[in-house]
Amino acid sequence: MGQSYRAKERSPWGVSEMYSNRLFPAYQMSPNLPTMMSWDDYEAKATAEWQALLNSAEGCDERTIHNFLVRNPSWLPGARSMTRASDYAPCRWALLSESPLREWVADSYRDAVGTKIPDFIWLAHDSNNFTPVLIEIESPCKKWFTNSGDPHHNLIQAMNQLAKWRAWFNRPANMIAFCADFGMPHSYKNLKPEFVLIYGRRQEFQGNPDLNRLRTQFEQEGQVVMTFDRLKAVRDCTGYICAAKTGQRYRALSVPPTMRLGPSNAGAWCQIDGLPEAILTNEWISLERRQFLVKRSCIGPVGRDHRDRCDPRLIGRIGSKGASHDLPRRIRLPGPGHRSNT
């Protein structure tokens, strides 16, 4: 028999509304779980791919960089905010890619007109603050400064984008619309958006302390500007997926090879479409483990059959009986937000 766990009732924000006002059943831990990729193996493999990409001609292409970050969410900063040390996992346990900002117009939500879609968004939070982190990425090959030491026009344009987002959030109606559209719970007291620009390479400043000091002037409260050389895999973010939000629906774009399923993330992920497809397309996950994860994502976290949201072709040969949950030895489920124990 596998080891069992019983999780206490949670707020609807930590898990989904469908689990509120009820207890989780006991979880059974399988004694023979398919092995997942270790963090050390993932970090080494992803780092080698990242360095090769940055130092190649393809590394100048913003879309190629974007696609790498979609597949590797743990490489982007801000999951637990940029300026305050939050111990809480981001909402949805997901990095959002190219998800439009929405406004309330004529009694309905619509994509904000004339507002650039952020490359990425983390919905960071703690016990008092809801901190959406909007991330703009530019090409690693773009220059910060001209030969005369003036800010390059590409940099000015990118900085202006952060200013436009900040101005957008300064409108109370937009703040309300953002919180409602992304499902911010009423228990949070403060909306404190943060903005990140990832731009250029570090080598432009090497041996030039004057330029290095000058670039720090582009940062301000709630705003961070960095080069692509600062990006690296963050172990605390190993369990987060990447998804896109369109209208009121979320769709999974990728899952990490270090992915686990458990009560901490099951509620958030059951609201995201396409999770089985995202699992099956990750070739860094062994076939056996992909099959295991797909079965768990289709059957659901409380034994409820969610196969209606799975393409039957994905589970036809895998079987209808789900294996037991892939859980850590200890599970803690505190408060509305929660720190990751998987």
Image: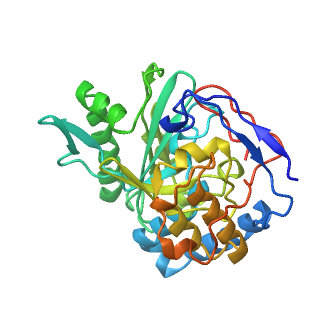
Q: Say left or right for 46 vs 255.
A: right
Residue 51 falls in image quadrant: bottom right
Q: Position of residue 310 (x, y in %)?
A: 49, 64
Is residue 31 or residue 151 the one in the foreground? 31
Q: How many marks?
A: 0
Relative height, residue 220 to residue 300 (above, below): above
Q: Position of residue 165 (x, y in %)?
A: 31, 40
Q: Relative to the observer, which residue lies in front, 160 or 283? A: 283
| Horizontal relation, residue 240 to residue 340: left or right | left
Q: Is residue 223 visible?
A: yes
Vertical order, 329 against 107 (above or below): below
- For the residue pair 284 and 268, the one nearer the viewer reads as 268
Q: Quadrant of residue 290?
A: bottom right
Residue shown at the point (47%, 79%) measured from the top left:
58
Q: What colour-coding does the image apply?
A: rainbow
Residue at 64%, 33% (x, y): give it: 338
Who's the residue at 47% across and 33% down the image? 131
**Residue 206 appears in the rendering:** no
Work out whether residue 236 or residue 208 is closer to the camera in this orientation and state it. 236
Instruction: Find the residue positioned furthest to the bottom.
Output: 57
Residue 24 image offset from top left, x and y in percent: 66, 36
Q: Is residue 46 above or below residue 248?
A: below
> Against 89, is 39 above or below?
below
Q: Position of residue 5 (x, y in %)?
A: 79, 40
Residue furthest to the left: 106
